[in-house]
Image (cartoon, coloured by chain):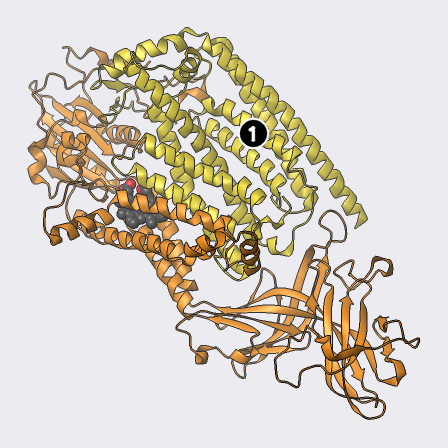
Amino acid sequence: MNLAAAVNENLAHYSNVLVYTAMAIYTLAFLAHIAEWVFGSRSAVGRTAAALTTGTGAANRASVTVRTAEKGGGTAVLERPKVITRSAAGSRDVPDGPGAAGGTEQGDVYGRIAVGLTVLAFLTHAGGVLTRALSVERAPWGNMYEFSTTFAMVAVATYLVLLALKKNVRWIGLPLVTTVLLDLGLAVSVLYTDSDQLVPALHSYWLWIHVSCAIISGAALYMGAVSTLLYLFRDRYEAQLENPEGKQFRQGVKSVLARVPSAASLDKFAYRINATVFPLWTFTIIAGAIWAEAAWGRYWGWDPKEVWSFITWVAYAGYLHARATAGWKGRKAAYLALIAFACYLFNYYGVNIFITGKHSYAGV
Amino acid sequence: MSTTDTDSAAGKAAENAAENAAEQTADGGAGAEERELGAAGSQLSTAPVEELSVPSLGPLGWARWFWRQLTSMRVALLLLFLLSLGSIPGSLIPQTSIDQLKVQDFKDKHPTLTPVYEKLQLFHVYSSVWFSAIYILLFISLIGCIVPRTWQFVGQLRGRPPAAPRRLTRLPAYTTWRSDAEPEKVLEAAQRIMKRRRFRSRITGSAVAAEKGYLREVGNLLFHTALIVLLVSFAAGQLWKTEGSSLITEGGGFSNSLTQYDDIKTGQLFKSEDLAPFSFQLDRFHATYERSGPQMRTPRTFRADVTYWDGVDGPARKTSIKVNDPLEIQNYKVYLLNHGYSPVVTVRDGQGNVVHKGPVVGLPIDGANLTESMVIKLGDYRDKNGKRDQVAYQGQFLPTWVRSKGMFSQFPALDNPALVLTAYHGSLGIDGGTPQSVYQLDKSRMRQYREADGKTKFARALAPGDTMKLPGGEGSLTFDGVKSWASFQISHKPGDQTALLGAVGALVGLVGSLFIQRRRIWIRAVKGSDGATVVEMAGLGRSEYAKLPEELGDLAVRLQTDAPPTAEPEDGTDEDGPKAASTPGDTEEPAHPADPAEGASA
Ligand code: HEM
């Protein structure tokens, strides 16, 4: 018994060391990302992208773009015919930016270093979360400290998985690492709670299901929100390309915006993430209701946490509707998506800290 | 590697997209794109058509206009927005349904705000008139939306995929090649391929029209219908529910009838004969607590071992009820709510007769450590001379008594249980008939016993087994031991199963609605002027469907086994180059094999 307690205390200690180490590596990754963007800003591609796109994109709406690439699949013998794609009428035909490195070799090297460091930091981070879980012999999300560290871990995991799937997400590296650092900093300084057991009401396999779904949803929705935010800027930037006489962003901002994916791509990426996560979030709420029924004898009691999950859900449903409603597509829908994510965040931080309800008994 | 091509159809005759529209059943969308594509792009979903037109005069016109507005996407959006906005105050202002005490507290602190809040029903937001109005409107809107969409969808199922638009090059994904195969053979092969890929297809004129992904609409309709099922079953649950609680000491029991509940709330349509027959008995209660650390005292395990009987004379069965693990019996659920201790005492009067024997239930007075205050009232009591008297013991029960730390328990477990009591005699004031709380003592006509010195107030601290004797041989109280009590919530909500069904339906529908893509593909094969067959393929989907070009490419590869491409004629179309594979997606970036991260599209 005592021996086990000592082992657990040791594990908890290792966990803290690992989390701090991960923060140090994330900081290095952050610096590497900054270097990537800085070198990228010196690239000719970045500076001339604007000039290029105004010519073809805006003036020649009806133009058709062609993409060619390698043969698909290793065993394919047949060559595929080229497929001509054409963006929907009324949307801009602006290509994606070249990425943070702006096509510069040096920037790209730093970008790769940044990704490598992120992977390393992630492994350390995951180790920290795992040892914490082992030290308390349960899922590592019994209080806000554990929730925050796990949340950040899953956000990074989502990013790395998308990278591994060769999705165009490297641009999200800098904002992601920045927020992960903020989140972890907050977790170790303000939210830290010593490892401990759970009150009986939290003992249930629905805890695993409900909370893990909530964490995964949040981490993915976060990616969607970053993309939406960037979409709003990039959209304005593209509008400025069409109208060079109007108000313009400053040069530095332009240089950043020229390198991120096109507004259409960002919008689509955000939509796909949000739409994919929405059923998961729906399930999270259903699972929570089932758990509440088992623990407290009612599915739904309008507890503040439940209210804000509901608000978040309705807000995302509103976003999905907005996208299917003429006159609400585009920027307006994007604002809705940001409001919806703000609701998620408030549910997590705001409700735990400012409002007391049944859910806030796990030690902040 | 990437090239930019100008519209390969440039130079053709002026666009006439409406030509094929004659074959269409209905014309839906009004977007610029859809107008350009004619009927081919119409009704790729069953979303209601937006209209902002001013109604024609007359009440009927206005009624129709109003109904159309209510069931439009725009208003659904507005109502959804209002619903989330309306939910907010309930999370910030204390609610009577959750915590009456907090509401009272709030009212005491904000005397000026309170009347305003009460007017606005802000202390019970979720049953307020205005909140109900929002969701009822939303659900009317929902029903008004589902019904026509269902009919429209049935119509689409009966109809056939729309014919190919005249200029396939206008579509979001397009490919073409020349072949020596005969056009009829190409079309036949194309239809065979589309059928095998589970597209609904048909040949119209010189083209095959195919469509797939109708399940998206099914999913969407299922989702919205399931929302209605959910609401209806919640309503049913409210109307027929029963929810009550009962406090039971170890050894005691409960049988399901109205008198056995300490308190009970029932729905408007509930009748007492609806109560199902079952009973249970609390055999033992186990609790353990965190012994150290910041969360010291928080409960670690709660377990009630019970024996229960299903039906009037069912066999006895044993089980345990835990916090997350209610007893389910005849569609009722018995939840463990709370627990505490009942000291078991034997009280003798001045004559030595037992006037009370058994557990005493106290009132918890500190949350975590389970100190309980209690009163034992003895109305039928004789003093040592045999005269009638009334006696009351009053005091506290402490599961863990630490002498130096005063009259509050130091830990919730039974580490050092003590019963600290004083006693009074006189008139309890119960003969007048006014009901009294069992936890409170009206001392106005009672006198406290004094020690032998006549000054110090009489009081004793008892450990289990101890006996306290009242001064002057007026009687005694023996602390026999401690039993636990547990309180249970016994609830019955009839709509639960359907609600679960609705939730599952909503989830399944949602997955279908968001992950299945509805899209159309057309394949045209005509003899060109030089005698070769020109094969054209084009696809149309919702703008979010990024895999369309890829799918079209796959289908083209498949079709090329039946319609092998021949060399391009030598004139003009310079950019075509060798037939290379295509990457779908929305990026202009070349797929750089050395740079997986940036290369492929999202
Ligand atoms: C009250 C009237 C409602 C109307 C008229 C309505 C209408 C629609 C329509 C037409 C679609 C399909 C859009 C498309 O094809 O993309 C849709 C999708 C959807 N609706 Fe509703 N709906 C209503 C209520 C609700 C409610 C109350 C919710 C849930 C809170 C909801 C959630 C959704 C979701 C999640 C989608 C999927 C969006 C997508 O396909 O992108 N709807 N709704």
Q: Chain of mark 1?
A: A
Quadrant of the rendered structure where residue A114 is? top right
User: Is A251 situated left or right of B573 in this image?
Assistant: right
Q: Residue at x 88, y 71 (%)?
A: B456
**Ligand 1: which quarter?**
top left
Type of amino acid at the residue the image marks with label 1: Val
- Number of residue marks: 1
User: Is A207 situated left or right of B226 in this image?
Assistant: right
> The N terminus of chain B lies in which quarter of the figure?
top left
Q: Indicate whether B141 appears above or below B329.
A: above
User: Is B57 situated left or right of B333 in this image?
Assistant: left
Q: Residue at x 47, y 26 (%)?
A: A163
Residue corresponding to mark 1 = A180
Q: Indicate whether A248 appears above or below B252.
A: above
Q: Which element is circle 1 on? A: helix
User: Is A254 situated left or right of A196 in this image?
Assistant: left
> Is residue B98 something that shows in the picture?
yes
> Is residue A95 something that shows in the picture?
no
> The C terminus of chain B lies in which quarter of the figure?
top left
Q: Position of residue B118 (x, y in %)?
A: 45, 56
Q: Indicate whether A10 appears above or below B437.
A: above
* Along the line of sight, the residue nearer the viewer: B318 or B404: B404
Q: Position of residue A323 (x, y in %)?
A: 31, 36
Q: Indicate whether B289 appears above or below B467.
A: above
Q: Which chain is orange?
A: B
Q: Position of residue B427 (x, y in %)?
A: 73, 83
* Along the line of sight, the residue nearer the viewer: B94 or A178: B94
Q: Which chain is yellow?
A: A
